[in-house]
Amino acid sequence: MNASKKLVSRVPEITIIFWIIKILSTTVGETCADFLAFGLNLGMTTVAFFMSSIMAVLLIIQFSKLNKYIPANYWAIVILMSIIGTLITDILVDDLGVSLVTLSIIFTLAMLAGFLLWYRSEHTLSIHSINTNKREAYYWFIILIAFALGTGLGDLISEHLALGYGYALFLFAGLIASIAFNYYAFKLNAILIFWFAYLLTRPLGASLGDYLIQPTFEGGLGLDMLSVNVVFFTTIVALIGYLTVKNRST
């Protein structure tokens, strides 16, 4: 019983704190990527390479040393994937000229292919069953694709369709609220609902980030990128600290 619990704990329990950190992480992924690439003039490719290197190290540690859920390592990987997912989309669209529609289709197909391979191999897509390296590898692949796809969907709604960041923010928030309502009201499949909600929190967070930092003439609030990142990072660190203490006491 105890061994099984340790295996399952490679990923966190789905609580309100999980969703809060997830949304904050997606917002940071958008604002931090812009701050590093444009605010500090490091360039998207340089930042993507640097962040990918750090993420690779943390994943190696996760698979070879930890093999269980450690809040700091887990959420550090999520934040890095959020930043990298943003940069993947921006590089493909801004530097390589891939349209947001084409990009969204490609990443949607990639995600569906990932889910198909995962299910055919493991016969489940539940995050509560992630207790092997193989299942965790599928999990992280889906997460990275979800961040890239979510960034593309957010930009597609707010920029390509010119509906604005505020509209996109309320649209995705409404979709998530609708999913939550239908889940509790009609007892829909928990696994399916989780992955829909997980995907939609990405464009929600990205739209929130853009709405906060983009200039007012582009439909944003024009807040300072550094200040936004500091506030969000501080909140994330505080919540991770709480989870770390809680995790050690259980």
Image (cartoon, rainbow, N blue to C red):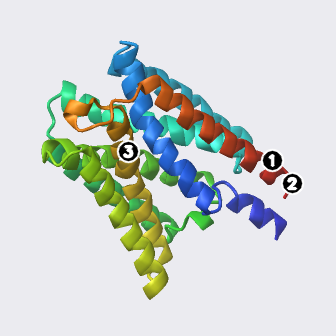
As helix, strand or loop, the secondary structure at mark 2 comes to loop
- Which residue is located at x 61 percent, y 41 percent? 236
Tell me, yes or no, whether the two marked residues, 1 and 3, touch with CB atoms within 8 Å.
Answer: no
Question: Which of labels 3 and 2 is toward the front?
Answer: 3
Q: Residues within 10 Å of mark 1 (few under 14, many from 20)?
A: few
Mark 3 is on which residue type?
Answer: Leu
- Which residue is located at x 80 percent, y 63 percent? 3
As helix, strand or loop, the secondary structure at mark 3 comes to helix
Q: Earlier in the sequence, mark 3 or mark 2?
A: 3
Q: Residues within 10 Å of mark 3 (few under 14, many from 20)?
A: many
Compared across the picture, whether 173 is left or right of 236 comes to left
Q: Name the residue tied to disc 3.
A: 208
Question: Which quadrant: the C terminus?
Answer: bottom right
| Quarter residue 193 falls in | bottom left
Q: Name the residue tied to disc 1.
A: 245
Q: Name the residue tied to disc 2.
A: 249
| Quarter residue 152 falls in | top left
Where 46 sits versus 82, above or below?
A: above
Q: Residues within 10 Å of mark 2 (few under 14, many from 20)?
A: few
Q: Position of residue 58 (x, y in %)?
A: 61, 33
Compared across the picture, whether 109 is left or right of 98 comes to right
Tell me, yes or no, whether the two marked residues, 1 and 2, touch with CB atoms within 8 Å.
Answer: yes
